[in-house]
Amino acid sequence: MPETVVVGNWKMNTNLGQALELAAGIGNQLKNMTGVQVVLCPPFPFLSSVGGALRGSAVRLGAQNMHWEDSGAFTGEVAAQMLQGLCEYVILGHSERRQLFGETDELINRKIRAALSHGLRPILCVGETLDERESGKAKTVVAEQVRRGLADIVDITSLAVAYEPVWAIGSGLAATPEIAAEVMSEGILEVLRELYADAGSEVPLLYGGSVNPSNIGEFAAQTSIHGALVGGASLQVSQFVQIVNLALAAKSPPAS
Ligand code: PGA
């Protein structure tokens, strides 16, 4: 059974003061959390300070993006080796990167390879648009994104995959747990198993898209969903902490 993982993606939000306050609030409340990996992904400039605020807490740190080259003339970009030692995880291929910044599966694949070669844990994001869903292509689109994103990658032990239907992100319109679970088991898990055999079943699969304290329990109750990638609700300490606790409760019901 893959580990339970809950990631907060702050996107381009917070100032330094707010970032520190959020990190301290979440870090304190989830300080001794076990049974779930909690990861906060602040904007680049706050990684170091947020890392400081999380010291002594079980909460981990992640970046929201990175470049695939190690160094060079890439104004404004950040390399994997710059993140190494600063954070453990990196979100790659988020639909906002794909849609607003033209990232292709091929670029995302290069980024995943760079992340792995620098010991970072990539969270590969995949998901279909509304048009693709309405024309019945959700599973094939997602399966292709997984295949291309992982092309020529042999070792996936530190990978997580997030299924985020584009139409569900920031819209308040979460997928139903059944829809998400179906795409995740047939569009993602099946491909991972085909490519990596048993190792494919060990990859944590996260659902993302309008996750909140009211719906996380139902998502996490699905066997093919091992956690969540949370945007908006990760910007409020109490909502995010509730999501983590409810995800953990759904994944590990108390022994009777
Ligand atoms: P949301 O964002 O929770 O605000 O829908 C999720 C994401 O984009 O990772």
Image: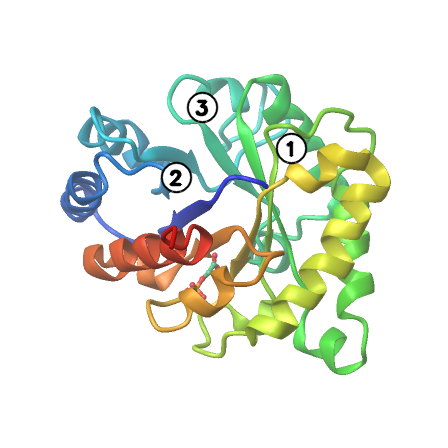
Q: Which residue is found at the position 77% from the left and 60% from the top?
A: 186
Where is residue 94 drawn, in percent x and y?
Answer: 57, 52
Q: Report ligand 1 position as a quadrant.
A: bottom left
Which numbered disc covers residue 111? 1
Q: Quadrant of the N terminus?
A: top right
Q: Earlier in the sequence, mark 2 or mark 3?
A: 2
Seen from this angle, which residue lies furthest bottom?
134
Q: Which residue is found at the position 34% from the left and 52% from the top?
A: 244
Q: Would you identify the image quadrant in which residue 185 lies?
A: bottom right
Please name the amino acid that badge 3 sits on: Leu
Where is residue 187 drawn, in percent x and y?
Answer: 76, 58
Between 133 and 175, the residue placed more toward the observer is 175
Q: Secondary structure at mark 2?
A: loop
Please name the amino acid that badge 2 sits on: Gly
Question: Mark 3 = which residue?
Answer: 83
Left/right placement of residue 1 relative to residue 77 reads right
In this rendering, the answer to whether 41 lies above or below 152 is below
Q: Secondary structure at mark 1?
A: helix
Where is residue 83 drawn, in percent x and y?
Answer: 45, 23
